[in-house]
Amino acid sequence: RDGVERRVRLIKVNCVDFQTICREKGVDAYPMLRLYKADGSFSLFEGERDEAEIVRWIERTIKMKSYGWADNHEAFERGCNAKGRLLVPRVPGRLELQAGGGDQALNPRMTNVSHLVKHLSFTDPDDGRYHRKSWAGLPLDVIRNLVPLDGKAFVTEEFHQAYIHDLKVVSTVSARGQTSYQFHHHRRVSTVPEDEIPQAKFHFDIEPFSIWVKADSKKWYDFCTSLLAILGGAYVTMRLMAHGSLGVLAALWHLMPRPKLAGGALDDGGPHWSQ
């Protein structure tokens, strides 16, 4: 960057022998290549692991003043995005998502499989990618059960933990004869051994019965009968409230002190006159 030649020293650390240091530095995959500066900040290599690519990365990175450098390993944490469609038989099954692969081996003690479900639904194979069009006309409570996991995050709070999702799937036939699939979701957290890479698991069970959604229309006389029943109920309720109020007022009247008339007679609350 400033025309000064810099010397880069290579240091190899065996994380099997130095587990504490690797854990403190956030080394969660092997092999991992970092370039450190004197102030402790570093940059992480994420390219193809051949000599020419590594040399180009070192030459390019040391010219950067701030971009590509960080003081904490969490700034370089990356997740993965799983997307696609699977054809499964109509029998109980499971889908397991395991982190790892590629040219790196993950550290099981630091692997986190917390995940965000952007969309998960069940459809017939012939529906294709535009299967949501068949949801038109369904009640809102049914539509919510078609995608109950969409937009939900499942974050583990401890190491060596993974979520297991149990899904009960029920086919639902709309009034237009189109089939959709509702499912009920139950989650649980499992603890895995320290030397095993955790997996996010989805267990599904397709029920043998179906739910049919049909429109139930009412005749005009049914509507009139319901309306009269509501009016009659309101009238009876108001009559009961009126009688109750009069009874309370009468009881309070008898409890109130009565004034005395001339001659020692008691005023009974009625009208009085004299000739």
Image (cartoon, helix red, strand yellow):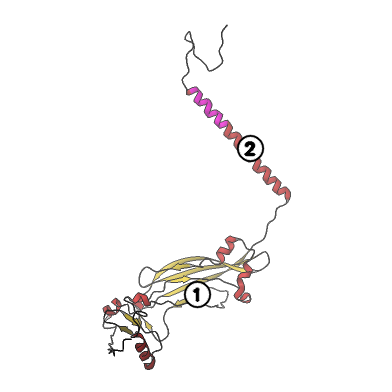
Tell me which residue sits at (49%, 72%) in the image.
Answer: 203
Q: In the depicted view, which residue is nearer to us: 272 or 121? A: 272
- Where is residue 95 drawn, in percent x and y? 49, 75
Under circle 2, the secondary element is: helix
Q: In the depicted view, which residue is nearer to us: 34 or 240? A: 34
Say what amino acid the circle numbered 1 marks. Answer: Arg
Tell me which residue sits at (59%, 61%) in the image.
Answer: 140
Compared with residue 208, is residue 25 higher up or lower down, i.e. above or below?
below
Say what amino acid the circle numbered 2 marks. Answer: Tyr
Q: Is residue 242 left or right of residue 200?
A: right
Structural distance between the alpha carbons of marks 2 and 1: 59 Å
The image quadrant where one finds the C terminus is top right
Under circle 1, the secondary element is: strand
Which numbered disc, 2 or 1, marks the residue closer to the eye? 2
Query: Residue 142's quadrant in the figure?
Result: bottom right
Q: In the depicted view, which residue is nearer to us: 134 or 204? A: 134
Between discs 2 and 1, the one toward the N terminus = 1
Q: Residues within 10 Å of mark 2 (few under 14, many from 20)?
A: few
The reply to whether residue 180 is in sight is yes
- Where is residue 50 drawn, in percent x and y? 38, 92
Residue range highlighted in magenta: 243-254
The magenta stretch spans residue 148: no
Main SS, magenta residues? helix
The residue tagged 1 is 94
- Where is residue 52 drawn, in percent x and y? 38, 93
